[in-house]
Amino acid sequence: MTQKPKDSKAKAYRDQTQAYLDTQSELKDGEVQKAVTTVTTGTKVTNDAKSLNTKLSNLKEKLVVGNSLNNNIQM
């Protein structure tokens, strides 16, 4: 990134990777709703890496389903 600061593909990869890492950290800290928001943002990155998008999408699906089940149990 420092050699090509306008490299949109590199920025997209970095943003996706950061979203994945942040989501994992938020889950570890018990911040499920924040993790859902972060992973959703990560899936909306353009010029993305397909493999990272797949990982983020799979993680998002698990979070949304898990969060939905948790909300139903608390009712």
Image (cartoon, grey):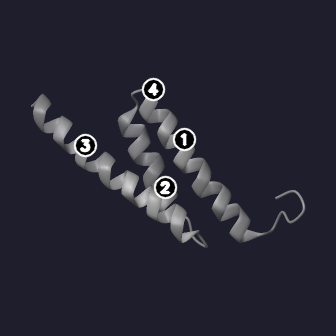
Residue 20, position as x, y percentages in the image: 53, 48
Q: Who's the residue at 58% across and 69% down the image?
A: 48
Sooner in the amino-acid sequence: mark 4 or mark 2: 4
Residue at mark 4: 29
For the residues bearing labels 3 and 4, Cβ distance under 8 angstroms:
no
As shown in the figure, which amino acid type bears the numbered disc 2?
A: Thr
Please state which of the two labelled residues, at mark 3 or mark 2, is closer to the viewer.
3
Horizontal side, residue 64 vs residue 75: left or right: right
Q: Amino acid at mark 4?
A: Asp
**Mark in front: 4 vs 2:** 4
Residue indicated by mark 3: 66
28 left or right of 65 in image: right
Per the image, the residue denoted by label 2 is 41
Question: In the image as oriented, which residue stretches furthest toward the top?
Answer: 29
Q: Is residue 46 left or right of residue 60?
A: right
Label 3 to label 4: alpha-carbon separation: 16 Å
Q: Secondary structure at mark 2?
A: helix
Q: What distance separates the C-alpha of mark 3 from that of mark 1?
A: 18 Å
Q: Extreme right residue here?
A: 3
Residue under pointer 1: 22
Mark 4 or mark 1, which has the lower sequence index?
Answer: 1
Q: Position of residue 75 (x, y in %)?
A: 9, 31
**SS class of the residue under badge 3?**
helix
Decide which of 21, 37 is in the foreground and name it.
21
- What crowding class fits label 1: few (fewer than 14 Cα within 10 Å), some (14-19), or many (20 or more)? some
